Amino acid sequence: MPEIISIAKIDLPYKTNQNDLKEFARKVFSTSFEDIDRLLESFDNARIENRNLCVPIDYFFSNNTFQERNALYIELSLKYSIEAIETCLNNAGVGKNEITDLIFISTTGISTPSIDALIINEMKLDSNINRTPVWGLGCAGGVAGIAKANIAAKANPKAIVMLVAVELCSLTFIRNDLSKSNFIATGLFSDGISAVLIKGDEASIDNTSESTVSIIDSRSKIYYDSLDVMGWDILDSGFKVVFSKDIPSIVNKNVKDDIIQFLDKYDLQIKDIRNFITHPGGIKVIDAYIDALNICPGLLNNTREILKQYGNMSSTTVLYVLNKFIEDGFNEGYGLMMSLGPGFSNEMALLNFKC
């Protein structure tokens, strides 16, 4: 089975306290909502202490154009992708020219040529590298990226796949959008960059670590007639967030059956999962997972901690959760990665952790 051999995440230079962003929201939205004090309680209820930001708060007071914000997205995506890739390679002792496949995941900016092409040019990676830019998966992108890397590594057992996920959610903020959805997003979303290195069974890499994380399988589930649950409305001014309050109820209604069907293929049950690597869409989504799966709340401590210290970084968040398992320790046995995203979809990956 393909193995995850290295992972890296970026702590951005403008990591900001949630209370500072709460005061920012008060200044920006107070003229639009008479009950602003009541609404601002959502910043506290989110159980977030810090947010990972690629720019300082003062940046958001300006009416930056879509073009200006997108240009910054391209610049910073390239910069931090390279930093994450180099850290990931160094941790694994792998040379950049050994990478056979590059998968790039993002939803928070646009670029043609795609960012992966910019990375290849800047780093002078193998000019024959197999590249796969994936756009529009939103919060589901991290798990979907792991799934696509797994497929590539199974198709070519000698493959060394670099997965990069970049989400600069803060740069999608539209200063003159005083809607409720933009207010909620201001209290939740932040920025993240992560790189994950996956090798095929026959890849010539000496893994000196006694612990391994193998990818067994993945499954994607899209729910019909739910296209309006999450995504973007594309406006002249940029990406306007679409974020339904119904997401926790969708989790409660559907996720358990999806997981049971997925695990049944391997004669497994939910109780057999020792590590839950779950995207924290928000504290209500975390609680919905616990209720729907009837699991101990402690099994989602890593998910809760990443939400607390970073906020919701869209596709990259679940990779930060995975990194925390690998850095801080995991339970030997099966792991389940899960994330929900636009479509509306549920992405799952079954892992095997060995000490």
Image (tube, grey):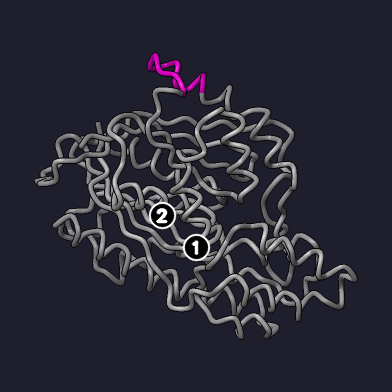
Magenta range:
260-270
Which image quarter: residue 21? bottom right
Q: How many marks?
A: 2
User: Closer to the N terminus: mark 1 or mark 2?
Assistant: 1
Name the kind of residue labelled 2 in the image: Tyr
Q: Is residue 164 left or right of residue 298?
A: left
**Where is residue 346 drawn, in percent x and y?**
56, 36
On the rendered image, what quadrant is the C terminus found in?
top left
Q: Is residue 142 left or right of residue 172?
A: left
**Where is residue 174 drawn, in percent x and y?**
70, 72
Tell me if residue 2 is in the magenta stretch.
no
What label does residue 320 carry, if any?
Answer: 2
Tell me if residue 266 is in the magenta stretch.
yes
**Where is residue 40 drawn, in percent x and y?**
75, 67
Residue at position x 57%, y 42% in the image: 340
The residue pinned by badge 1 equals: 310
**Where is residue 2 drawn, in percent x and y?**
25, 36
